[in-house]
Every structure is written in C-alpha cells, then in structure tokens.
Image (cartoon, rainbow, N blue to C red):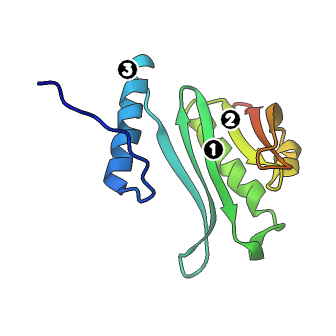
Amino acid sequence: MKPNYEIRVESKIPPAEMGQIANGLAAYNASKADGDMPNYLFVTIRGDDDKVAGGVIAATYLGWLQVQAIWICDELRGQGYGTRLMQAAEDEAVRRGCPRVFLETLSFQALPFYEKRGYVIRSTLHDFPPGGARYALTKQLAPK
C-alpha cells in the first residue's frame, strides 16, 4: 500500500526535524557538487567574561565565503569591530581557498559599511521590507 502524505504549516520547529531538512538539502547539494559541503566558521568578539558581544556566522562552500549573519552589540558599534570581524572571516576564506564573498543585507542594516569594504551590489529586491530593500553583495578577495 502506498503511504499517505500531508502538508502541515507548523510554527514550533523541533530542532532535530529542522536539522533533518537542512542535512537532507546539504546531502542533495553535495551529490551535485562533487561532494562539497559547507565548512562553517564562527568569528566572535568576546569580553573578559568570555560572553559573545558580536560575531559572524558564515561558511566556505563551492569556492565562496557565504556570510549568513553578522551582529555586534550596541555598545561596541562604531569602534572598528565590524571591520575586524569581516577581515578575520575574509582572511579565513582565503586560507580555505575561497576568493569570493557573498552576503545579503537589508536597507536598514549595513549597506554603507559593506560598500566601504569593497562589496558590490549584485541585485536589489525592492520593497523587502516594505518601503526598504534587500541587497545581495559580492566581493573578490585578494590572495594573501
């Protein structure tokens, strides 16, 4: 007998099931990309108490550094930490053989910061969020 399937919209996401979907996609992508899998990196700013005050979550994958999240606590903004975080992530990407970076930012986030660092807008999705925009940016990294 053929199994029955149903589609559900769920607001509570069990981490193991979320991992099953992410791992399933990663395995499928690896089967099409000569086995390449994302190699994650986590660059942090930590205080004397070892608590995270900011950081970058990214992965090197398919020849690119893909930045997924960047955050710095309010009290450290504007003091050069963002530049140092991004430089550390970019240096690690080059060390891993990934000479290009891809990231996205929203109009109320850090577009001028990225442009100052040499990132180029590749696409703009207007009205995401309403009245704003979402930008996709890339940067070519110089080998060290």
Alpha-carbon distance for marks 3 and 1?
23 Å
- Above/below status of 144 relative to 49: above
Residue at numbered disc 3: 31
- Above/below status of 49 relative to 24: below
Q: Residues within 10 Å of mark 3 (few under 14, many from 20)?
A: few
Q: Residues within 10 Å of mark 2 (few under 14, many from 20)?
A: many
Q: Earlier in the sequence, mark 2 or mark 3?
A: 3
Alpha-carbon distance for marks 1 and 2?
7 Å
Callout 1, which amino acid?
Val
Tag count = 3
Which residue is at 66% across, 55% downward? 70
**Numbered disc 3: secondary structure:** helix
Alpha-carbon distance for marks 2 and 3?
23 Å
The dot on residue 67 is 1
Query: Could you say where residue 141 lies in the image, as x and y percent from the top left?
Result: 73, 33
Q: In front here: 107 or 43?
A: 107
Q: In front here: 125 or 97?
A: 125
Callout 1 touching callout 2 (CB < 8 Å): yes
Which residue is at 88% across, 46% downward? 116
Which residue is at 76% across, 77% downward? 75
**Numbered disc 2: secondary structure:** strand
- 14 on left or right of 72: left
The dot on residue 101 is 2
Callout 2, which amino acid?
Val
Callout 2 touching callout 3 (CB < 8 Å): no
